């Protein structure tokens, strides 16, 4: 039984946001960290992968759609939009073979038993897909088929980059939000689990992060930098 677990989702290659969250987690006395997918796709892919893979302690990783897309070198032929494919290619070129292999072998989901919460299922999008969105306002009847085969009492997800904590048909669904590409929040968002569910938002130096992002060489880096400085109110 784990006492406390940090869930960090959708880092999206934002090394400054990741660093801020990791240092806050250091003060939270956690037994484990769950990295909820969409790690590298973004402005600082190699830096973020190096940092994540050098973490000490118990760290679990699950796969996001963007990890699958980067690791598989997806392009427009696989259905990606032009600009997503361009960034995808740029990210894949920056990762080592070992980092690409790591992304390729990620598991899709994970179950942990956490003090005060019981069995918690971690997924990226929904329990049946790494790219299916569950939002704060997704109608219960649309969520029902996504969770019908879930036995765990709590589902932790991400992918839509906005935090929430709601109960649908007796199942608690927690969206951890996004560490690196958050919407409807300024800081880096994540969740602290056990014995309660705490939705957290960690401040970081947005100006400095935006400058680093502008200088990273990624296609559309300015758009990412502007996102950090002025997060949109709507998620992707
Ligand atoms: Mn995603």
Image (spheres, helix red, strand yellow):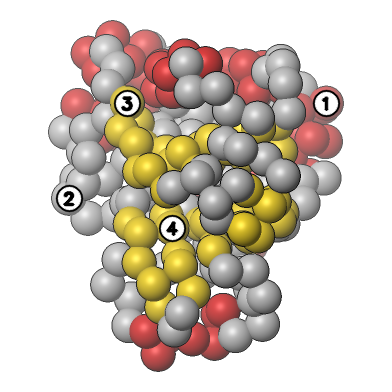
Mark drawn on residue 202: 3
Q: Residues within 10 Å of mark 4 (few under 14, many from 20)?
A: many
Instruction: Tell me how far mark 4 sits from mark 3, CA to CA.
Output: 18 Å
Q: Nearer the viewer, residue 101 or 136?
A: 136
Q: Residues within 10 Å of mark 3 (few under 14, many from 20)?
A: some
Between disc 2 and disc 3, whose residue precedes?
3
Between disc 1 and disc 3, whose residue precedes?
1
Determine which residue is flagged by label 4. Answer: 174
Q: Give the secondary structure at mark 3.
A: strand
Q: Is residue 19 left or right of residue 108?
A: left
Q: Nearer the viewer, mark 2 or mark 4?
A: 4
Q: Is residue 171 left or right of residue 208?
A: right
Between disc 2 and disc 1, whose residue precedes?
1
Q: Is residue 3 left or right of residue 142?
A: right
Could you tell me if the residues under marks 4 and 1 are in contact, i.e. CB atoms within 8 Å?
no
Q: Give the secondary structure at mark 2.
A: loop
Between disc 4 and disc 3, whose residue precedes?
4
Determine which residue is flagged by label 2. Answer: 233
Determine which residue is flagged by label 1. Answer: 98
Q: Nearer the viewer, mark 4 or mark 1?
A: 4
Is 12 drawn above or below residue 158 in the view shown? above
Q: Give the secondary structure at mark 4.
A: strand
Residue located at (44% from left, 41% from top): 191
Instruction: Tell me how far mark 2 sits from mark 1, CA to CA.
Output: 36 Å
Is 58 drawn above or below residue 133 in the view shown? above
Picture coordinates of residue 203 (x, y %)? 27, 22
Q: Nearer the viewer, mark 2 or mark 1?
A: 2
């Amino acid at each position: 039984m784990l006492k406390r677990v940090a869930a960090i989702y959708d880092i999206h290659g934002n090394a400054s946001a990741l660093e801020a969250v990791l240092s806050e987690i250091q003060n939270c006395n956690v037994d484990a960290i769950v990295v909820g997918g969409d790690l590298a796709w973004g402005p600082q892919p190699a830096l973020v992968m190096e940092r994540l893979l050098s973490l000490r302690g118990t760290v679990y990783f699950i796969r996001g759609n963007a990890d699958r897309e980067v690791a598989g070198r997806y392009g427009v032929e696989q259905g990606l939009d032009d600009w997503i494919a361009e960034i995808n290619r740029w990210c894949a070129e920056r990762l080592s073979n070992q980092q690409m292999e790591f992304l390729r072998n990620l598991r899709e989901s994970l179950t942990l038993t956490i003090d005060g919460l019981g069995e918690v299922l971690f997924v990226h999008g929904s329990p049946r897909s790494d790219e299916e969105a569950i939002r704060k306002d997704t109608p219960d009847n649309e969520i029902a088929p996504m969770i019908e085969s879930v036995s765990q009492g709590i589902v932790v997800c991400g992918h839509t980059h906005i935090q929430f904590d709601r109960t649908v048909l007796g199942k608690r669904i927690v969206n951890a939000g996004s560490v690196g590409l958050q919407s409807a929040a300024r800081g880096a968002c994540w969740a602290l689990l056990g014995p309660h569910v705490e939705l957290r938002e960690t401040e970081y130096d947005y100006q400095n992060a935006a400058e680093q992002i502008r200088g990273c060489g990624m296609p559309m880096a300015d758009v990412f930098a502007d996102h950090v400085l002025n997060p949109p109110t709507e998620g992707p």
